Amino acid sequence: MTATAPKSMTEVATLQAPFHSDAAIPFPAKQQASSNPLILKLEHACALDETDKAALRALSTTTRKFEADRDLCREGDRPETVHLVVEGLAYRYKILPDGKRQILGLLLPGDFCDLHVAILARRDHSIGTFTPCDVTEIPRTTIVDLITTQPHIAHAFWWATLVDEGIMREWMASMGQRQAAKMVAHLFCELLVRLQAVGRATASSYELRMTQNELADVFGITVVHLNRTLRDLRAEDLIVLKSGRLDIPDVARLKGFCGFNPNYLHFDLRSAEA
Amino acid sequence: MDARDNVEALLMLQPIAVDTGSPNWEGRLFLANGMLIAVLVRLDTPEYEVGTGWFVEAAFGRLFGISAPIFDTLEEATR
């Protein structure tokens, strides 16, 4: 049974490939099919056995397709299910009374949109899609069942929640204290590392289908300032951003430029001893 | 908070070059009753997704932190 499972996954991926890919798709189909993004991500939390992986795989078998620029859920909704992004790019946001939008987080393949949100009476922010997304809607009972019966998964889910908080803290530090060029460079480094962890980036590039307006709302700066910042980074040969793709000519240089330290992503497994 | 509150004030636009680190350096100091309240910069290059026009580069006092649109003309900006 374990021998046939990967084969059927490969077949599914091959069948789906023409619908998903465009000519510029960077990943070999084999890499995409090798595992699901949730498992790839949670393997950074702790060792998962076959039972854990089967349970996690089962979570993402039934996906729902959302077009780009759609809301998965809105501020004020009563949360019933937990969303898991399987493919695509989604984001958390808030609209202020004067109409300004702040983007609060980027949700990549393998990211949950708040694991325990169904505890809450109402959502305090909205979640939308930047690109077409495959999303799983997981009932709260399934999450509760998994964390009470499978200790590794409970551990990994807590880890994922802590990582989400770590990312939020780093974004706050960026917005409060980093100058624009370093703040933007820092996010590009973060996305490289996060996307690599789920097999969605090469050693130095990834798909980034965001407009300048959307990027400006991540950083809380005007689109004019964002545009100048991107041009400065380009002029320094730190990034190449073209046709929905970010290429980093020298990753170490970009990381050095913004002082990127990936510690807040917690991708190093904690060893058994203290 | 509204610039319209200043409608009775004496408004002046003074040409100034602004180092924006970009080709768009043509600017105006925007004064109300002799006090600097904003710096406007002319966006001329088509690369901005927002288009061309007068951009509020910086604002002071009651206008501090406003998010103004890009104005087509200086007359619009001073309204």
Image: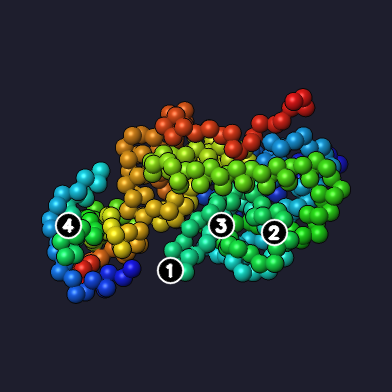
Q: Position of residue A211 (x, y in %)?
A: 43, 54
What's the mark number on residue B28? 4
* Quarter assignment of residue B37: bottom left
Residue that badge 3 annotates: A92
Q: Nearer the viewer, residue B76 or B48?
A: B76
Which SS class for mark 2? helix
Residues at marks 4 and 1, CA–CA distance in whole angstroms? 27 Å
In the structure shown, which secondary structural element does the residue marked by tag 3 occupy? strand
Give the percent coordinates (x, y) of residue A269.
70, 31
Q: Amino acid at mark 1?
A: Asp
- Which residue matches tag 2? A117
Amino acid at circle 4: Arg
Under mark 3, the amino acid is Arg
**Crowd band around label 2 with a 10 angstrom C-alpha radius: few (<14), some (14–19), many (20+):** some
Q: Quadrant of the N terminus of chain A?
A: top right
Q: Are marks 1 and 2 in contact (CB under 8 Å)?
A: no
What residue is shown with label 1?
Answer: A98
Question: Chain for mark 1?
Answer: A
